[in-house]
Image: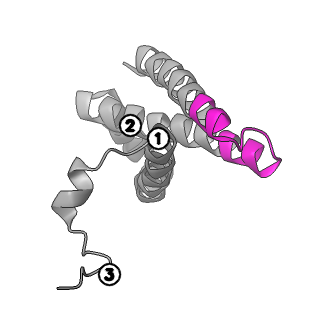
């Protein structure tokens, strides 16, 4: 019997146990942070609308932002922005030809994690 050399179907469960390389994980997370920022624009525009509607709306927004859930949402959006900025800078550097090798990709992914973690922790300290 002849061996079938066609590719196999990959399911969701196969993707979860696959050993993803670090540069791939940082790239996927960069895309996810972009989606979070896109959704977060809706929250930001809603807050802007509420704050500009009236003086009491501004006070309501201040109260929302001072609540733990408001601080958490703010921290989440700032964290997504920080990560997206750092990972986007890495992608721009790669577009310039810097860090395109396998070793450069690994180093760049580690630097993205290092710098974004520092910025996210700083944001958490300043917001909360």
Q: Where the N terminus falls, by quadrant?
A: bottom left
Magenta residue span: 90-107
Give me the C-alpha separation between circle 1 and circle 3: 40 Å
Q: Position of residue 17 (x, y in %)?
A: 21, 48
Q: Which residue is mark 2?
A: 76
Choose between 12 and 28: the one closer to the eye. 12
Does 91 appear in magenta? yes
Q: Position of residue 6 (x, y in %)?
A: 32, 81
**Residue 54 placement, left or right of 94:** left
SS state under label 3 = loop
Of mark 2 and mark 3, the one earlier in the sequence is 3
Q: Position of residue 15 (x, y in %)?
A: 26, 57
- The residue that appears at 33% across and 40% down in the rendered structure is 60
Q: Which residue is mark 3?
A: 6
Dot 2, how many residues are within 10 Å of its Cα: few (below 14), some (14-19), or many (20+)? Answer: some
Q: Where the C terminus falls, by quadrant?
A: top left
Q: Residue furthest bottom?
A: 1
- The residue that appears at 37% across and 40% down in the rendered structure is 61
Q: Position of residue 74 (x, y in %)?
A: 40, 36
Q: Which residue is mark 1?
A: 80
Residue 107, placed above or below residue 126: below
State if disc 2 and disc 1 touch (CB < 8 Å).
yes
Give me the C-alpha separation between circle 2 and circle 3: 43 Å
> From the viewer's perspective, is the residue at label 2 or at label 3 nearer?
3
């Amino acid at each position: 019997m002849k061996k079938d050399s066609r590719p196999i179907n990959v399911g969701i469960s196969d993707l979860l146990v696959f050993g993803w390389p670090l540069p791939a994980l940082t790239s996927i997370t960069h895309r996810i942070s972009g989606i979070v920022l896109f959704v977060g624009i809706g929250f930001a525009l809603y807050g802007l609308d509420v704050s500009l509607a009236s003086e009491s709306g501004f006070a309501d927004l201040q109260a929302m932002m001072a609540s733990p859930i408001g601080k958490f949402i703010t921290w989440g959006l700032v964290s997504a922005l920080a990560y997206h900025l750092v990972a986007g800078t890495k992608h721009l550097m790669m577009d310039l030809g810097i860090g395109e090798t396998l070793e450069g990709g690994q180093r760049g992914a580690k630097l993205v994690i290092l710098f974004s973690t520092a910025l996210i922790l700083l944001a958490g300290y300043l917001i909360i």
